[in-house]
Amino acid sequence: MSRLKTTDHLEENTHSTLLITADTVAVYDGIIREKPSSKEEARQFIKSYSGGQATVVGSVVVTNLTKGIRKGAWERSEVYFHDIPDEIIDSLIEEGIILNVAGGLMLEHPLTLPFVDTLIGTADSVMGLPRSLTEKLIEETL
């Protein structure tokens, strides 16, 4: 923050420069799940969600580089799934994109979406950037 602070030479009416950072993890049975490290781990993750539930925790930090103000918060969502057939799991793994997302959980994927039973929270939070939380933090830092 001290390296990025630029308040010494800015005029009073200069527009603020914001830095927005975010991260998301999936939580299953009390264990934090980052991106799967292998296809086998991805298969294990998705099978565990089948007929069950996963929690997604997303955090956002907004830093006003002009004013030196930083605000952060987190949001939690729960996703409940119908049973996910093995052939769907196989297709998701072969496609490979789920290896790049927290917990191998990609709510918006066309193969996954039909098996979502209930979402408590927001889709944008599960997808990685909770919109309303981000907007609130932006307002607080301006």
Image: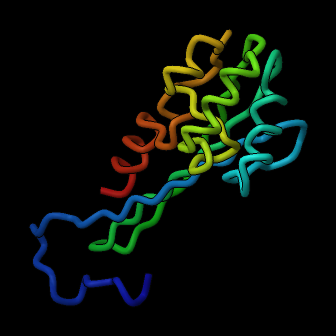
Q: Position of residue 17 (x, y in %)?
A: 24, 67
Location of the C terminus by quadrant is bottom left
Q: Is residue 130 above or below residue 70?
A: above
Dividing the picture into quarters, in which one does residue 14 lie? bottom left
Q: Nearer the viewer, residue 15 or 99?
A: 99
Depth check: 13 or 111 in front? 111
Q: Residue at x 44, y 81 (%)?
A: 1
Q: Residue 5 is drawn in which quadrant? A: bottom left
Give the answer, above or below, for where 7 lies relative to 35: below
Give percent across and percent down for residue 120: 65, 19
The residue that appears at 51% across and 52% down in the rendered structure is 60
Please name whichever residue, 61 or 7, is drawn nearer the observer in this view of the structure: 61
Residue 52, image quadrant: top right
Answer with left or right where residue 54 lies relative to residue 17.
right
In this view of the protein, which residue sits in the foreground, 96 or 132?
Answer: 96
Residue 13 percent location from the top left of the image: 9, 67
Image location (x, y in percent) of residue 103: 70, 43
Please name the residue shown 59% across and 46% down the image. 101
